[in-house]
Structure formats: C-alpha cells, structure tokens
Amino acid sequence: MPTLPMPIDHTAIRAEFPLFEVRAGGRSLVFLDSAASTQQPSRVIETVAEYQRHQHANIHRAVYQLSQGATRRYEEARATVARFINAAEPAECLFTSGTTGSINLVAAAWGRANLQPGDEIILSILEHHSNIVPWQLAAEASGAQIKVIPINDAGELDLDAYRRLLSPRTRMVAVNHVSNALGTINPVQEIIAEAHAAGALALIDGAQWVAHGRTDVQALDADFYAFSGHKLYAPTGIGVLYGKRALLESMPPYQGGGDMIERVSFAGTTYAGLPSRFEAGTPNISGAIGLGAAIDWLSALDLEQVGVYEQALLAYATDRIAPIPGVEIKGRAAHKSGVISFVVNDPPMASLDVGTQLDLRGISVRTGHHCCQPLMERLGVSSTARASLALYNSRDDVDRLADALAEILEQNRHRAAARAGRLQADQDDLAPRLQVPDATMSAAPGQDMNLGAGMHLNQVAGAEPAYPAAAADSPQAAADAIAEDFALLPDWPTRHDYLIELGERLPPMPLALKTDANLVRGCQSTVYLAARRKPGSKAVIECLADSDAAIVRGLIALLQRICSGQSAESVLAFDVDGFFSRIGLDANLSLSRRNGLEAMVQRLKALARDT
Ligand code: PLP
C-alpha cells in the first residue's frame, strides 16, 4: 500500500472545509464528486461573505469609495488569476461564468470572425459537451466542419490520428487538458505545438486540470485556456477565459452592453479595450473575489505536492476498487488525474443504483454520462459511476467507498440470483402450459437490461403481456394506500429499500415492447413504457414499464399501481407530482430522476388524453 506524501497535511486541509464538520451517524460525508464541483474552504466562504456584508458595490462606474474598493478587489482577483496561470498580463484573463461561458465566447466571437466554409475544427472524443456544442453552433453558422480525435481502449488520445486530421484547413484545435469522465491527462503541450505547426490555433479546456497541478499558459503556448471557479475551490458562476492579447484584440465583441463600450451613439459604437470589451454588463463581482481567495488558498500549498498527493491517492483508490468483483474501471490511461469511472457488469447494476446506494451510506459520487455522450457511446455504455478526488479526500474516504461498493455489489449478486430463481420458477410453472421448448426460453436476444439471468415467459414471442389490473377503486385510493405504507417507514433509507422491493416485483415487460417508440427520453437510466387502452374498453388505460435501474423500477411500480387499470379521466385528474411530494420522494430524488418520472407521467397522460 503506498503511503501518502506528507508535505500535504491532509487533516489540516480537511479541517478548513466546513462541510466535513457535518456528521451523520457519527461519520462525516465522503465527498467524491469534486470533478463536478469542489467544496469551498472557510477562507473562500468568509472572503465572499465579508465582501457581501461590508464591501459590495457595483464596479468600474462610480466615484464613491465603496465602489472603488470593490473595483480594486475585482481587478486584484484578475491579477491573482494571471499569476496563477502565468498569463503575460491580467488583461488577457477575462472573467466569464465558467468554462462553458469561456468556450462559447471563443466559438462565437472568434468563430464569427474567422471560420469559413471548408474550414476545420478538431475536437476529441473525450470532450465535455461544453467543448462540443459551441463548436457545432459555430460550424453550423460558418459552414466549417468538425473532426474528432479518437481514443484507444485505455482512454488516451490517438495522437497519430490527430496528426492525420491536421491539415491546412484546420483553424482550431480544442481539447481538454484532463477528461472529466475518465481522468486522462492529455499531452496538451504537444497537441498545441502540432496545431501551431499546421497553422491552427489551440484552445484548452482546463476545467479539470487547474486545481490539480501547475498551469503555465505561456509555457504551453495555449492560444486560449478556459476554466471554472467551482472546480477550483471557489464559488459557482465564475470562470476564466485566458486568451493571447493579439487574438482577443482581433476578435469582435461577444455580447453587447454596459462596460464593454468606449462610446455609444446611434451613428455607431466603439468598444472598450481588454478585458472590458468581453465583459458586458455587471459581472459576478463576489464570484471573482471568491475565485481570487480560492487561488490564494491553493497557491499557499505547493501545487507540485498537491499533484503528488492526489496521484498517490488515485493509485491507492485504483488498487482498492479494481479488484472488487463485478467492477470494471473505464479509463486506464498511463497519465491520469484523480478520477475513477466504473461500471458494474457482473451481474449488471445500473450506475444510477450504484450512486443511490452509495449515497445511502453517506458517499457522494456522480453517475450518468458526465456530459460526454459521444465518449459514452465510444465506451459502449450509457453511463458510469465516477468517484473524483480532491485535496480533502483521504485513504479513509477511499476505504469507505471500496468497502461500501463491495457490500453493495454483494447484495446485487444476491438480488440477481433471487430474481433469476423466481424467473426460472415462473418458467417451470408456465412452460408445460405454453408448450414452449426450454431452449426457446433460455437466451434473451438483444436483452441489454439487467433483468437478471434468464428471461420471463412474457418475453417469449406469442405470450400475452400481463398488464396490471387496477390496484384500487381509483388512482386516489391507490395513492392513499401507498401513502399509508410509506407513513409506516421512518426514513428515506427504509423507503428506498421498500421501493426497490416493489420494483423487484414489477410485472415483466416483454422484449417486444422495448422498442424505440416506447423508450422514455429524459431519464438518466434506460426506461421503456408501454401504455394501451384496455382491450374491450374505451376509457381504461393500462401500462407496463421497465428500467435498468432498480430505483426507477420502484417508481414505475408506484406509477403502475396508481394508473394502470384506471379510467383515463381519473388518471388525467390525478395530481402525480403532488402525490410524490406527499410521500416525500421529491426531497430524495435527484432532478434527473424527477425529470424521468415526469416524462413517464406525461406519456401516460398523453395516452389518457387520446382515449
Ligand atoms: N469541461 C470539462 C472538462 C468539465 O469537466 C466541465 C464541467 O464538468 C465543463 C467543461 C463545464 O464547466 P462549467 O459547467 O463550469 O461551465
């Protein structure tokens, strides 16, 4: 086991983060989602609070001292940013809303002035949507084309392919410094040099790098470098676009408004110089000051040592997580930052369920596509669970993650075995009656969801799907019964277990119904919903649904109990949202799951309206 290097005093650092003072059941939160947003140390929180309490005024335009003080602090923050990334001057560092804002600025303003039909922009398959969609918009507007650098199976960029993509038509190469989904650290210095040799510019998305090692935009020779405050121990809503002065000066303004002008008249407007030219309107003053404080806080540590500490922690985490049976780590690049993305394959378990189960144990990881859908497609998965490390994480955190994961996957194996047993029993029971040979029932062609080993008889062609009948006299009566059950359960963990149990007993949905038309969009997991008018009835609707995520199957079970077998009129009249908040689910479901639920409800209601 590697011992972690000591110049980073992890315990002292962790003590600076108020979030970790909160203890549940005697244990503090294990926060492993810093790639999404880092927590903030007291110094940052207090600097912002103090500014808001006693120092706030709008900047740049007033003669009074309060405003001048705020202006000074805002501009000092810019100077701090410039030192942090070694920009030649503060004016090359524009404050934006974040990495997304920074990349949109370049794609729109530089793109408008420079891209023409036939030009090419090179991106990589590792990119966050923030470094894809703005370029797609710019390409659409200009007639330029996007080329994509592929990766190898370890998640590393294929640099030979990159060189082959470069051509005299290449105008811009935009890649991330570190992949948020896999942690791959890209050789950006080399990538930039090759872009320049081909006559192109290079933009680096540094969102996942700046908090984890030294950044020197001049040594990199980056033309543009973008990052966000909230991944750098600073508040949300503030970020930076670094650009070389000559390039920024040659670009037309991005947005128009106050602060970015020199003189406005209806005969024509002239624009301010850098950096104001690209900071239209009142900026996020407290955010910039908070970012300055976060950089000061981080810079007081040795960033080389920060890197060494996090690398040792990553190695430890990889050693602990990789051997857990059923886990497959996605992204095994030789140069990686503190990100472990994984899927559970054997038996399959939806990332959403892994994340929910970890959350019940006080461990926060991210699940989903991480805003990298093209990458997920390349990896052949729809989502991963991702644990990402920061300075306040320790081996204890990693141990709690690994132990919890091992326990969760053990339970998953038991559940899958029990489910397979139940399915087999059903098959044994029904096979003689349907006279279907065993062989027909064993394989599940195209079965991509974790419905357990084997397959239910309803999945056999010709078997009539069993749509559930009404569970009560009306949706309201069914909902009241569910609410009574929930009221007996004391807390979210037990309600969660109850939901999982309900999901386990969901009537099976035949594969034939798992069609594109029945796919419910807007859910983090894969969800199919088939609704129909009950045969022989004009106004009663029935539904069958399924998901690869156990928790979603539980929600489906609730929805089915309330709606299936009920009159269209009563389904339309029922307040599903109100019901889910009545039983306390809205407080415990993530927005994406609530959106998914909403999408299912909308489907049902649309059918009910058509009846
Ligand atoms: N680029 C990368 C690599 C990211 O990880 C993220 C956020 O996760 C972004 C861009 C977008 O950052 P923001 O949402 O702060 O604009």
Image (cartoon, rainbow, N blue to C red):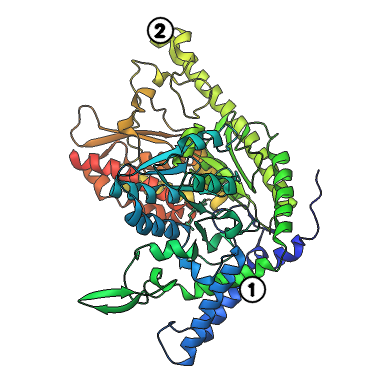
Q: Which mark is residue 322?
A: none
Q: What residue is disc 2 on?
A: 435
| Amino acid type, callout 2 | Gln
Residue 101 position (above or below residue 413):
below
Q: Is residue 52 left or right of residue 216?
A: left
Instruction: Work out whether residue 607 or residue 13 is closer to the camera in this orientation and state it.
Output: 13
Residue 193 position (above or below residue 23):
above
Residue 214: image location, x then y, percent: 65, 58
Mark 1 or mark 2: whose residue is earlier in sequence? 1
| Amino acid type, callout 1 | Arg
Residue 593: image location, x then y, percent: 43, 47
Q: What residue is disc 1 on?
A: 43
Residue 364: image location, x then y, percent: 59, 52
Q: Is residue 4 left or right of residue 156?
A: right
Assess mark 1: CB under 8 A from ligand 1? Answer: no
Mark 1–mark 2 distance (CA, rounded to whole Å): 73 Å
The quarter of the picture where the N terminus appears is top right
Of helix, strand and loop, which one carries label 2?
loop
Instruction: Work out whether residue 166 or residue 517 is closer to the camera in this orientation and state it.
Output: 166
State the residue at coordinates (81%, 49%). Answer: 3
From this viewpoint, is residue 525 visible? Answer: no
